[in-house]
Image (spheres, rainbow, N blue to C red):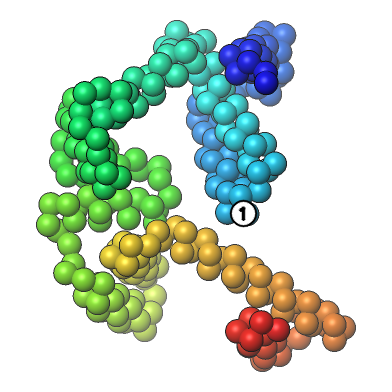
Amino acid sequence: MPDPADALLRLLDIMARLRAPDGCPWDREQDFATIAPYTIEEAYEVADAIARGPDFPMLMDELGDLLFQVVYHAQMASELGKFAFVEVANSISTKMIRRHPHVFGEAEQRTAEGQTAAWEVQKQAERAARAETGTLAGIPPGLPALTRALKLTRRAARVGFDWPDAGAVLDKLEEEATELRAEMTAAPDKARQADEVGDLLFVVANLARKLELDPEACLAAANAKFERRFGAVEHRLAAQGLAPQDTTLEVMEAAWQAVKADEKTGG
């Protein structure tokens, strides 16, 4: 088996060469802000590979792409004299040891639930050390909106600011839908409509939390279902010599309902 250290050194050398004065012009032009979107994209592609089974060949490839993003940011920071890859690796190693005293220290063994609770206590201490105050401090603004809504409401719930049950959240959802409908029937005001749609989505994320579901995963599954069903609609239309743009909504709706019926019966 190849030496992991050799493989990592090879990757670090490749990154340094790409950023060298005689390296790749595109890579040399990049900075943290321009590379950040690629980092996010690669993380999603890792998640996609996992959702596919996992698709292990794809997962290996995508994890490599994500690792390259870490190396890229570390190389740029090194060029500025801020930190190098070795400090990134040491930092996460130190953090994991600190957060797992039941494994690396003398603390009593914990259940998975106990570790989750202890993890949150440790993160609270780390936020306090960074002078981040407030119940909601430290939740990154750059997270996907549904994920951030989940984290915000979960954090608020820890101090008692929460709905009693999922039914109460569903009642709130109906209330928000009524408010949105009122804005839709009033004089058009896109800012107010956007505010109400935002409230609606926030409550949906809260409802998912109360049901112990991940709203991002729920929406991803719904996206995949729509994609699968619409593709089947197109296939049905094509069998009749039709394309969606050449037919009517009624015809497409009939095909859609037929696809749903087939799914229920396994057809």
Instruction: Please give left or right for residue 28 compared with residue 140 in the image.
Output: right
Compared to 225, does 32 lie above or below? above
Let me know if residue 198 appears in the view.
no
Mark 1, Cα crowd under 10 Å, few <14 / some 14-19 / many 20+, is few
Compared to 103, does 164 lie above or below? below
Q: Amino acid at mark 1?
A: Gly
Q: Quadrant of residue 131?
A: top left
Instruction: Please give left or right for residue 128 compared with residue 10 in the image.
Output: left
Q: Quadrant of residue 237?
A: bottom right
Compared to 224, does 88 lie above or below? above
Let me know if residue 233 appears in the view.
yes
Q: Position of residue 239 (x, y in %)?
A: 85, 82
The residue at the point 70 percent across, 41 percent down is 57
Q: Position of residue 118 (x, y in %)?
A: 22, 38
Q: Which residue is mark 1?
A: 53
What element does badge 1 sit on?
loop
The residue at the point 78 percent across, 82 percent down is 236
Q: Nearer the viewer, residue 187 or 245?
A: 245
The residue at the point 38 percent across, 62 percent down is 213
Instruction: Please give left or right for residue 148 compared with residue 220 in the image.
Output: left
Q: Position of residue 26 (x, y in %)?
A: 68, 24
Q: Position of residue 34 (x, y in %)?
A: 55, 31
Compared to 78, does 242 lie above or below? below
In the picture, the quarter occupied by the N terminus is top right
In the picture, the quarter occupied by the C terminus is bottom right
